[in-house]
Image (cartoon, grey):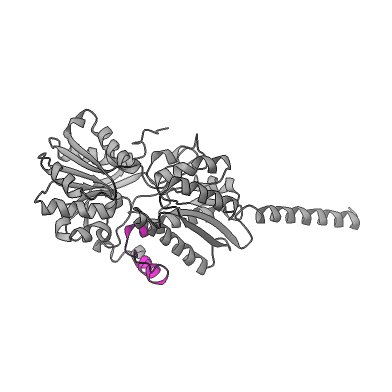
């Protein structure tokens, strides 16, 4: 090849390389220096306590950026308040995609809000990653291949409680107080399904609203049934009320609280530590207020992170820890993407997590995903509060197929 031919080849190679770089740089939400990520949270309204998830996620990415970013790119985390309103969530999501040009939507909170935007995002092939909801609908890649949940499904959690009750309290009478929305209904329905032919053990249940002012009346009614197992499914503030009210009524059933409310700082301390002794729950995350984790390396990292980056009023809230762990998982996915930050590769890497363990998942609970496995966390552990620490009950429980989606 002559000098002219070699020169033309070099120019063509350079133009090809520049073209590839240009395509990468112009992927929506990605530049040579930035990755834009969208998020919605209830920073106001009845569920504003869960806004701590988004605040912790923002703080986590601030920390990552201070450390140099991800693959030399800083994360621009754009989060808005949807007030737990599905119509607002859809409008804000459109804005994040069409105005802010985000690469993906990450960790938005709530079942109705995420269902409201799922079709829009999937039609545009925009990742809706690690949805902050335990609805099993967010793990159905055959229908919605751009949507992936994160935590174990609520129904699976309900079945774990049903199995525990059958094993340890087979002749008990069960009552339940559940938040009257999709979350509360799913968890209660999971317990019913788990009991199967023994559903008759449930002698009463009451659905309540988050702002309900009659929790004492509801709990008095449930106490009067003579039940010896009480299952609660709701937010931490209401869980604290329920624990306190039951104790004040001198009612001491086997008290099971859903994982969202199984927090020493978020529910047990507000209820009164002495009144919370004996509470049972299931979890997949460490509780940083539990002395059992005092010397844990992850806890030390949390304290340093909290003091330097996350100084909000919810700094000890379990919701903040949830946000930290979810953001850690997304960071892992983005690192796996390398320089290929196409949306297709983001989903490919999200579906290629192999025994990955964010620092705050319980020991031996790991995240594994696959092309047909969009439920990243599939394990729970039962534990009981003894007045100081959570004491494990039995082994880690695999909930992988408890939502009926076995492949």
Frontmost residue, 354 versus 184: 184
Magenta stretch contains residue 269: no
Please state if 152 lies on the left or on the right of 224 as rendered.
right
Q: Nearer the viewer, residue 14 or 98?
A: 98
The residue sitting at 16% across, 40% down in the picture is 168
Q: What is the residue that sits farthest to the bottom in this orientation? A: 308
Q: Is 403 above or below relative to 321?
A: above
Asked whether residue 67 appears in the rendered view, the answer is no
Residue 255 drawn at (x, y percent): 18, 47
State whether residue 215 appears in this view.
yes
Residue 126, percent from left and from top: 56, 46
Q: Which residues are magenta?
A: 300-320
Horizontal and vertical percent position of residue 351: 49, 44
Q: Residue at x 50, y 38 (%)?
A: 144
What residue is rendered at 61% in x and 63% in y? 33
Question: Looking at the picture, how far across and down is residue 23, in whole percent?
Answer: 69, 52
């Amino acid at each position: 090849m002559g000098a002219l031919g070699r020169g033309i080849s070099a120019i063509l190679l350079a133009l090809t390389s520049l073209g590839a770089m240009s395509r990468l740089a112009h992927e929506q939400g990605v530049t040579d220096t930035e990755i834009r990520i969208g998020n919605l949270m209830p920073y106001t309204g009845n569920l504003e306590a869960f806004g701590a998830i988004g605040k912790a996620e923002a703080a986590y990415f601030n920390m990552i950026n201070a450390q140099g970013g991800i693959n030399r790119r800083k994360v621009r985390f754009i989060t808005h308040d949807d007030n737990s309103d599905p119509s607002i969530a859809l409008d804000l999501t459109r804005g994040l995609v069409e105005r802010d040009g985000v690469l993906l939507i990450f960790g938005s909170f709530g079942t109705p809000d995420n269902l409201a935007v799922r079709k829009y995002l999937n039609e545009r092939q925009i990742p809706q990653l690690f949805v902050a909801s335990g609805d099993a609908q967010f793990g159905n890649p055959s229908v919605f291949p751009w949507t992936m949940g994160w935590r174990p499904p609520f129904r699976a959690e309900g079945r774990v409680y049903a199995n525990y009750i059958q094993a340890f309290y087979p002749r008990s009478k069960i009552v339940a107080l559940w938040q009257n929305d999709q979350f509360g209904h799913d968890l209660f329905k999971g317990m019913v399904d788990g009991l199967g032919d023994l559903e008759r053990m449930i002698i009463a249940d009451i659905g309540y609203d988050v702002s309900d002012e009659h929790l004492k009346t509801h709990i008095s009614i449930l106490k009067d049934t003579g039940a010896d197992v009480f299952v609660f499914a709701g937010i931490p503030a209401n869980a604290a009320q329920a624990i306190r009210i039951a104790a004040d009524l001198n009612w001491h059933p086997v008290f099971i609280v859903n994982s969202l409310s199984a927090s020493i700082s978020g529910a047990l301390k507000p209820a009164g530590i002495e009144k919370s002794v004996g509470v049972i729950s299931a979890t997949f995350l460490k509780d940083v207020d539990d002395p059992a984790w005092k010397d844990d390396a992850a806890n030390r990292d949390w304290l340093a992170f909290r003091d330097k980056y996350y100084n909000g009023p919810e700094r000890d809230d379990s919701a903040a820890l949830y946000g930290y762990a979810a953001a850690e998982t997304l960071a892992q996915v983005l690192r796996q993407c390398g320089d290929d930050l196409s949306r297709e590769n983001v989903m490919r890497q999200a579906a290629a997590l192999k025994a990955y363990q964010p620092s705050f998942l319980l020991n031996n609970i790991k995240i594994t995903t696959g092309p047909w496995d969009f439920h990243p966390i599939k394990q729970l552990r039962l534990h009981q509060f003894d007045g100081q620490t959570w004491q494990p009950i039995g082994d880690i429980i695999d909930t992988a197929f408890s939502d009926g989606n076995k492949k």
